Image: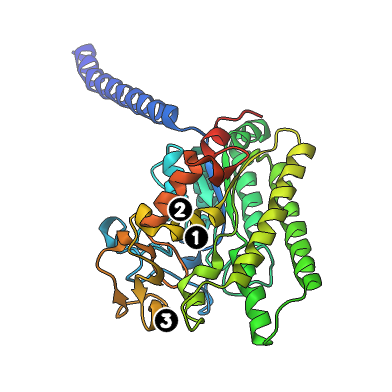
């Protein structure tokens, strides 16, 4: 009788165990299938508001640039404002999708909530299974750019360093090195440095001298070179770099012109930096074994879109979909702002940032679009490189 009862007791337990094993194997197979569709091990994002997916939501200062209130996110699933400076997804999301992920990796600061030990484990798991975003609205290469209102690149690097340490504590140095070498590092971070430099000249009612511009470029390139080298030393090998776009054509800048024209001076400043950036990356690739890169030419992409708006499906390329006043550029997008009806036909969401559709088109171009918009290879080719 005792043996019969023992057998009857064991059978349900064995059955539950078998079901659990089968379920686990099925989940592993599903994950393996998903992983096969991924072109890189993970995506790590450093940059500004064009890439931010919510880090600024967690900064305490009241002066921080934020996008966590309507109408931001109106076209995001459930019409939810997430901290993205967009009506929906941003370019980091669409690039991540192209690389086989559902969307951008999560914001770094969102992973640090709760007890330290649990947060460290969460950070390591996310970094090992998909990546992390350190991008912050307002960030620049220079610490002085919008200081106190964002997370500068230098601090983003410290966060990446902490993320690497969290991964190492779980799986070891060798495994992390292999993981990072197979990961995609997406950077877009110099736009705000351009705005701050140009604004300083405007406030002084003067134009920068050639010597001042040259010194500005030198400072930016030196800082950016150090940042890329540091990421390389951490283990990064694949660098997707978005250069400075047509910052002189955003509605905020256009509204300062009596005719609503772009600022040739600001666009010229950006173009000069982009030339220096291309030289820097070529030099780093020559000096650092395994360093692979692709420059996404946001500047050229903007020129193409503005030269023939209809080809991109735009009816507006000079005004903000969400805003107020002239060109929708007199206030940030917020509840009560004027909101355009067909957001897919507008190049700009607010007075500075592109619309969801604009970022979708940009990501497609950077991934495997026209050859003139990426150099020396596109993002798809970069993802397939081996160290």
Q: Residues within 10 Å of mark 2 (few under 14, many from 20)?
A: many
Question: First in sequence: mark 1 or mark 3?
Answer: 1
Residue at image mark 2 = 91
Tell me the element at label 3: loop
Which picture quadrant has residue 98? top left
Question: How many numbered badges does the structure rendering display?
Answer: 3
Horizontal and vertical percent position of residue 381: 55, 33
Q: Is residue 22 above or below residue 55?
A: above
Horizontal and vertical percent position of residue 191: 59, 64
Front residue of 222 and 125: 222
Would residue 318 be seen by someone viewing this image from the given angle?
yes
Tell me the element at label 1: loop
* Inter-mark Cα distance, 1 to 3: 18 Å
Asked whether the beta carbons under mark 1 and mark 3 sit within 8 Å of each other, the answer is no
* Inter-mark Cα distance, 2 to 1: 7 Å
Residue at image mark 3 = 331
Q: Is residue 383 above or below residue 314?
A: above
- In the rendered view of the protein, which quadrant contains the N terminus? top left
Q: Is residue 170 above or below residue 257?
A: above
Residue at image mark 1 = 50
Q: Residues within 10 Å of mark 3 (few under 14, many from 20)?
A: some
Which picture quadrant has residue 271? bottom right
**Image point (74%, 49%), residue name:** 280
* Inter-mark Cα distance, 3 to 2: 23 Å
Would residue 126 be seen by someone viewing this image from the given angle?
no
Question: First in sequence: mark 2 or mark 1?
Answer: 1
Q: Residues within 10 Å of mark 1 (few under 14, many from 20)?
A: many
Asked whether the beta carbons under mark 2 and mark 1 sit within 8 Å of each other, the answer is yes
Report the disc number at residue 276: none
Tell me the element at label 2: helix
- In the rendered view of the protein, which quadrant contains the C terminus? top right
Which picture quadrant has residue 76? bottom left
């Amino acid at each position: 009788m005792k043996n019969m009862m023992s057998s009857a007791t064991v059978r349900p337990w064995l059955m539950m165990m078998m079901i659990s094993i089968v379920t686990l194997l099925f989940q592993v197979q599903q994950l393996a299938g998903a992983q096969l569709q991924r072109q890189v091990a993970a995506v790590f994002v450093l940059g500004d508001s064009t890439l931010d997916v919510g880090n600024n939501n967690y900064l305490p200062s009241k002066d921080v640039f934020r996008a966590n209130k309507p109408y931001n996110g109106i076209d995001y699933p459930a019409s939810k404002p997430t901290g993205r400076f967009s009506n929906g997804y941003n370019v980091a999301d669409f690039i991540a999708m192209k690389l086989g992920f559902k969307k951008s990796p999560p914001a770094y600061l969102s992973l640090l909530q709760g007890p330290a030990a649990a947060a460290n484990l969460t950070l390591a798991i996310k970094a090992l299974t998909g990546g992390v975003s350190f991008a912050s609205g307002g960030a620049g290469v220079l610490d002085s750019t919008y200081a106190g209102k964002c997370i500068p690149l230098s601090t983003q690097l410290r966060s990446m360093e902490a993320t690497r340490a969290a991964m190492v504590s779980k799986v070891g140095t060798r495994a992390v090195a292999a993981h990072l070498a197979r990961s995609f590092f997406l950077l877009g971070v110099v736009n705000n440095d351009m705005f701050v430099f140009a604004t300083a000249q405007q406030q002084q009612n003067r134009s920068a001298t050639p010597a001042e511009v040259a010194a500005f470029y030198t400072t930016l390139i030196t800082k950016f070179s150090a940042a890329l080298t540091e990421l390389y030393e951490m283990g990064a090998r694949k660098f997707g770099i978005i250069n400075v776009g047509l910052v002189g054509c955003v509605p905020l800048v256009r509204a300062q012109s009596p005719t609503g024209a772009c600022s040739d001076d600001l666009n010229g400043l950006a173009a000069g930096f982009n030339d220096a950036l291309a030289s820097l990356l070529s030099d780093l690739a020559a000096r650092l074994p395994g360093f692979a890169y692709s420059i996404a030419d946001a500047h050229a992409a903007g020129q193409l879109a503005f030269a023939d708006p209809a080809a991109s499906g735009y009816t507006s390329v000079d005004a903000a979909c969400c805003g107020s006043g002239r060109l929708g550029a007199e206030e940030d997008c917020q509840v009560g702002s004027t909101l355009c009806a067909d957001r897919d036909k507008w190049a700009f969401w607010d007075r500075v940032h592109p619309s969801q559709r604009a970022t979708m088109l940009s990501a497609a171009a950077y991934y495997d679009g026209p050859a003139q918009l990426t150099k020396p290879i596109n993002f798809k080719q970069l993802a397939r490189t081996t160290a």
